[in-house]
Image (cartoon, grey):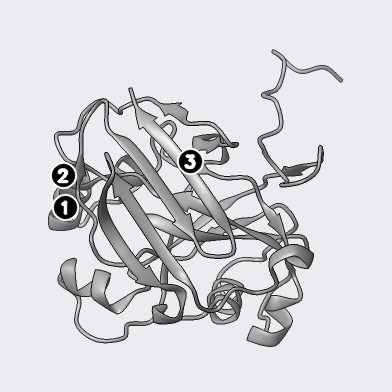
Amino acid sequence: MRYVFPPAAQVSVPVAGSDALFPVRRVYCVGQNYADHAAEMGADGRQPPFFFSKPADALVPGGDDVRDVRFPPATSNLQHEVELVVALAGGGADASPAQALEWVYGYAVGLDLTRRDLQRAAKDKGHPWDMAKGFDQSAPIAALQPLASVGHPSRGAIWLKVNGQLQQSGDLEQMSWKVGEVIANLSSYVTLAPGDLIFTGTPAGVSKVQRGDLLEAGIAGVGELSVRLV
């Protein structure tokens, strides 16, 4: 058996303090998982978690240096969302929150870049969000911190600066649905597996960014990530 053309390389994320790479299978994202961000998006109260996906090759794995990220076409309102990302080394279906936490390999800082104008237009028409969320290089991510290094972060500052100005500032304890609950709920819809990543939502303060902007993001005890839009 032979392929018609060579298959794409395996998407992977570096592991901090190691030469190991984490092979990525799927990328899931949780919508409006902080009450203040849900409010700025027009939602009211604690809502059941909902999910969308990004293609694995939308990831832009980062290191200690600033990474260039291409500004996407077809938008006049690109916005940033800093998020805690969960990496799974186990999986299954219909897990309890306690069981779900046993699947976690580690955590990272990630950015969910969003073409907000396309998202709003899709919402108005009842259309899918794919082109608003799943475009090329829409998911920068820092090196993964293994569980043995950081434990399960349940509180701590999560923040993002644009050109040195603080835009997003929150705390992980403000998550409406905690990590174990998020994984468990997602596992009721799909069978999760090693290599899956889950972006767990963003605090309030999302804002429009432009070409040339420097985005610096961090989560206490997890790490930092810097990208420049080019």
**Which is more toward the observer, 126 or 192?**
192
Task: In the displayed orientation, state which residue is furthest to the top.
Answer: 5
Q: Which residue is mark 3?
A: 140
Please tell me whether mark 3 sits on a helix, a strand or a loop. strand
List x then y, in percent, for residue 99.
Answer: 73, 82
| Image position, residue 71 (x, y; %) | 31, 27
From mark 3 to mark 1, how far is it between C-alphas? 22 Å
Q: Quadrant of residue 169?
A: bottom left
Q: Residues within 10 Å of mark 3 (few under 14, many from 20)?
A: many
Vertical comparison of 15 with 1: above or below: below
Quadrant of the rendered image containing residue 173: bottom left
Amino acid type, label 3: Pro
Badge 2: few (under 14), some or many (20 or more) residues near its Cα, within 10 Å?
A: some
- Label 1 vs label 2: CA separation? 5 Å
Circles 3 and 1, Cβ within 8 Å, touching? The answer is no
Residue 93's x, y, as percent?
A: 69, 74
Q: Secondary structure at mark 1?
A: helix
Tell me where residue 101 appears, x and y as whole percent.
69, 77
Q: Nearer the viewer, residue 64 or 176?
A: 64
Residue type indicated by callout 2:
Asp
Q: Is residue 104 visible?
A: yes
Q: Earlier in the sequence, mark 3 or mark 1?
A: 1
Q: Are marks 1 and 2 in contact (CB under 8 Å)?
A: yes
Residue located farthest toward the front when viewing the structure as drawn: 164
Q: The N terminus lies in which quarter of the figure?
A: top right
Q: Which residue is mark 2?
A: 117
Bin the neighbour count of mark 1 within 10 Å (Cα to Cα): few under 14, some 14-19, many 20 and up. some
